[in-house]
Image: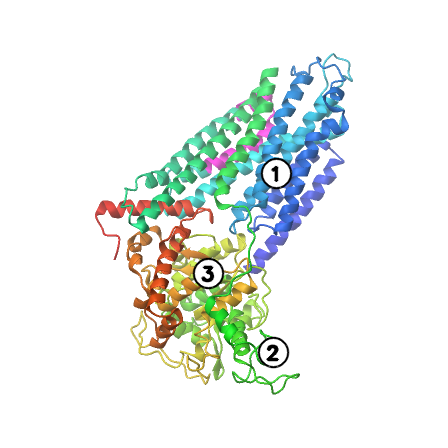
Amino acid sequence: MSTARSIFARVRFAFGLALGAVAIGLLFVSTYFGSVVCCIWLFVCGRWVLKAQSQPFGLPVRIACVAGILLTTAFVTLIPWLFYGGKEGCSEFDTSMKTSYGRTFNDFWIQLYFRGTLNWLAAIIASYMVLADHPASAYIRQSVRCVLFLWQSRALGSIGTMIEACEGADYDNDGQRDFASTHSLPAKLITPYGYAAGFIGDIWCLQLVIERLLAMEEAFGETLPRSRVIVWLSRFLIVWIALLAGTVYISRFTSMLVSMGVALGLAAITALVWLAYSVPLAALQAVRKVDAEDEATGLFQTEAAFAARVIRSAQVGMVLASTSMAWHFAAYGVSWVVNTKEWSDAYQYGLLADSLGNLMCLFLLAASAMRLPRVHCRSRIPQEVEELRQEEACTCGRQVGKALSGSPNRRPSHDQPDIEMCYRCAWDEKVAELANRQISVADLLTFYIRLGRSEDNEHRLKPLMPHFDAGRSTTNDVVRHAIIPESRDGDLGLALADILARKKSPGDYGSGDYGVGPVTTLTSAGGALTSSHPPRMVTHHWGNCFRDLVAAVVADGLSLRRWDLVAEQLSTGHEEELRVRLHDCGALHWHYWICAICINQHASICGSSMGVRDTVTGDVLPCCDCRTPKYFNDCPILCELNKFDSMMASLHHSHPNGFLQVVAIDKKFQLFSRAWCVAELVEAYNSHLEQHVMLHSPEVLEQHSRELCSLHVEDCSASRAEDKEAILAKIGEEAEIATFNARLQSLLLGSEGLLAGWLDGQKILQEVGAIAARAKARSRIQESGEVLTI
């Protein structure tokens, strides 16, 4: 499927090039149809050819684009003065002569003022949206391209009006002012382009409005009222708008009827969208007042108010867009039948209002996820690692970052065959080896598919874990039954990430031919990555269902903030649908660092299951008899279980502007009871890493929000007692531990904490629906009299 999608992407690109060539060729045959096809070509490129783009361009490119927008707008504004001598030069022809619609020079000149104002408003909005940073989102990129389309079409329309005003003529001597399109080549090109752009801009904006509503519906977790009717009505309107351009060739009366039908349809869809948004808005407004001293719940009031404002903005944006569209289409239809100056002006100004309404609508829908770029400082090394580096300065003269081989203290090389490797270099090279073990989302889905489903396996491979139960099997179960056996390499063992990195084609997976999933883009361990997207580190709990871990990673790739719906798709065999969605939003080949997959389990825990039993069968988990040496805290250099903070700092240094932490919170919030997980959270917080929190659902957050207030690191547990002792020792004495706990509370529940970040509307498009769902869950729990803890 990956190959098919790659071919399809190339087909889209080739089609875009071919359509562009056709449009240019048509200009030499028919300026009218050539201009219309050029407009369609820009729409196809922005809407379809570039549909997979989800990231903004680099800042230098964005700055150059903004400069181009502003300079072009200034140039268009000054055209009458640059080429025609200003108003005096433009008024040399008889200013009182009227067109067939009764318009004079003064009417055109007044319209230029309105067009110029709209041009600058559009330029400001377009400049902001082009320059702004935003989370990975194909939707936002679509919105930016649509705004650019509207800006350039209105700028060209202004040039057409300038030509009408400044190149007045009466070549046929009939006493009426000729339209510029009868004698001016630029006007012949611009006039039909403007008509087409008006219709296409409305179609594009309407599509984005509906997509925004459906995105919030997905995050809300239930079907919004009449959402299916809204979808089908929008499709009907899009078809009618597309057909409207040709109805004038049938009859003017037909054109008027279709135009009025579109206007009425827009009024209906506006009412339905308003009704759909009113449900999550009502859930937010229905939340009861809580004790202001309860920080965990008091914080939610602020976030709920923010979400309500965003929903109201979406409602207002839809009203602005649909009302201006209805004005545009109604006036367009009537102006064909009633040939008067008043209706001609109504159409011209309706077209301007339509563009302004669409611009404001798109800005209101997308602006909550955008912000102007900030200057990023170089990442800060965690204090413990910095102290270690200062205390353990390099004494061997080697460059940090080369591969480690041999003993922890010696490494033969051609230029320095017998020079001992110092502690710092040995530590850092092991950290670099760990940091370069990563897995793509595509490979993670492939591995998940192979766990327990033989009936869907086209190549009849034996499942890695025949008794795998998506709703019960934990990550610990999968590590013992699938990850450790699959990463066995003869008598030794590697990290599963290293095994996956050996693939040369989709058929090279593991021990047999497996044709699902794309080729990983990782090189062997310690090598460089070919992906340009920064990796992400996943903090998770091994006692959580492995399906839920995969769901959290996939949901992060899809820019969601809840993973319950993704988990449901994984349980029902819809992995390929998720793969398509990830591909479409550009996240299929994002790389993640997951300890269960990127740590070499054979070098630590594979030899003993410590009597832990399988969650499904109840049998003691299997052990591995490989000969891989085991390294624990007594061998700190080669141990892979004690370098999470150093590895996090290493990845942050390598990717200062993109590396982040994904916090995969399990349904029971047990992640916060694990010492290593809590340590990773605070380490990322102290290192100023961006942190993405992935929750099962808003209701689960409500059930556990209070118990987080009493969380202390000394109460957390670890698989090995020495791990917890090492974590507490690294924090310090009793006073330092108390400070750590205070910082932990701030991290989780503070005004800028993790759970507040989950509700932060500046990061993703779906967060408003998630906040509304949480509000509904809160109301339901409060009405039932349940306690918000378990």
Up-down: is 679 above or below 319? below
Which label number is shown at residue 398?
2
Magenta highlight on residue 247: yes
Q: CA distance from mark 1 to mark 2?
A: 55 Å
Q: Position of residue 627 (x, y in %)?
A: 45, 85
Q: CA distance from mark 3 to mark 2?
A: 31 Å
Which kind of residue does numbered mark 1 sit on?
Phe
Which label number is shown at residue 661?
3
Which label number is shown at residue 149?
1
Quadrant of the image occupied by residue 614: bottom left
Q: Quadrant of the C terminus?
A: bottom left
Q: Position of residue 232 (x, y in %)?
A: 46, 38
Q: Residue at x 52, y 73 (%)?
A: 390
Mark 2 closeness class: few <14, some 14–19, many ≥20 residues within 10 Å: some
Q: Residue at x 71, y 43 (%)?
A: 21
- Is 402 in front, or is 601? 402
Which kind of residue does numbered mark 2 sit on?
Arg
Magenta highlight on residue 231: no
Q: CA distance from mark 3 to mark 1?
A: 36 Å
Element marked by disc 3: strand
Pointers 1 and 2 in contact (C-beta within 8 Å): no
Q: Which residues are magenta?
A: 232-258
User: Which one is closest to the eye, mark 3 or mark 2?
Assistant: 2
User: Which one is closest to the eye, mark 3 or mark 1?
Assistant: 3
